[in-house]
Image: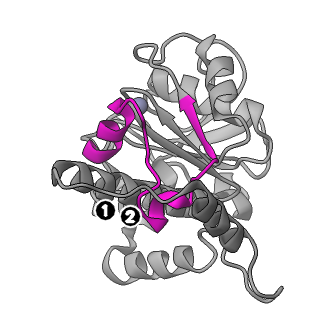
Amino acid sequence: MSVVAMNQSQMSEAEHALRVDLAAAFRLADRFGWSQLVWNHITARCPDNPDHFLINPMGVRWDEMTASLLVKVDIAGNTIQVIDGEGLVPKPGFVIHSGVFEARSDINAIVHTHTNDGVAVSALKDGLQPICMEGLFFYNSMGFHPFEGTSMDNDERSRLAKSLGNNKAMIMQNHGPLTVGSSVGEAFVLMYWLQRACEIQMKVLASNAEWTRVPAETAEHYSRQESDPRDITEDFRPGVHEWPALKRLLDRDDPGYVQ
Ligand SMILES: [Zn+2]
């Protein structure tokens, strides 16, 4: 592998913690079957400079990702400017992720995958359907981006941002799903729900049996329930409870990600 790990002394504690979270996201995503050889990207905005983000370099499998292997790049510009780290950053990863970070200052992490069921739903004319609670999580809050080929054109950044809008997830047509979050944990857990929803939908469609769509009124009621906990002590935002639990799984079985 031609990738060189960074020295931890070169970075702030906040950046190191973010790198650890991001490396955990790759290893967990691989465990859940979301990886595709060495392709696709999970990224996070740097805490010390919002104009920089961390991305996986070409050639590293998701199951072998570590905190120090991640490459820091500049969000702006038409050429990929590497700030820290070594390794090739593929242009489509830069275009897609920098476009979202640039447009949404509230977003600190992005997960994009090409899972079989995620791509399958992206090819369906009617997209994600209100079939199950996992999918209702995205009811009326899903962006849609028309397919333009592989994302090599810098101009696509503004179109991607427009397609995402203020949503927390987006289906990229004939391509795959994308989720965003204010933290790595939030973007990861949203992808978990979206991935599950895509898997369930494809099973339902493959069954050839008649199926029911949750009526709009009930779906809207569910959305309100999700966003309106019973009291202020309840915080069910995606990732708040799941992310520390998922990291404990890695700490027990696969702690090398923190390196
Ligand atoms: Zn992609």
Q: Which residues are magenta?
A: 116-144
* Label 1: element kind: loop
Quadrant position of ligand 1: top left
Residue on which the image places disc 1: 32
Residue on which the image places disc 2: 28
Q: Quadrant of residue 251?
A: bottom left
Residue shown at 78% from the left, 42% from the top? 50
Q: Nearer the viewer, residue 4 or 31?
A: 31
Q: Are marks 1 and 2 in contact (CB under 8 Å)?
A: yes
Most distant residue in the right direction: 232
Q: Nearer the viewer, residue 186 or 72?
A: 186
Disc marking residue 234: none
Label 1 residue near ligand 1, CB within 8 Å: no
Q: Is residue 58 above or below residue 223?
A: above
Q: Nearer the viewer, residue 187 or 65?
A: 187
Q: Is residue 99 above or below residue 181?
A: above
Question: For residue 109: magenta?
Answer: no
Q: Quadrant of residue 144?
A: top right
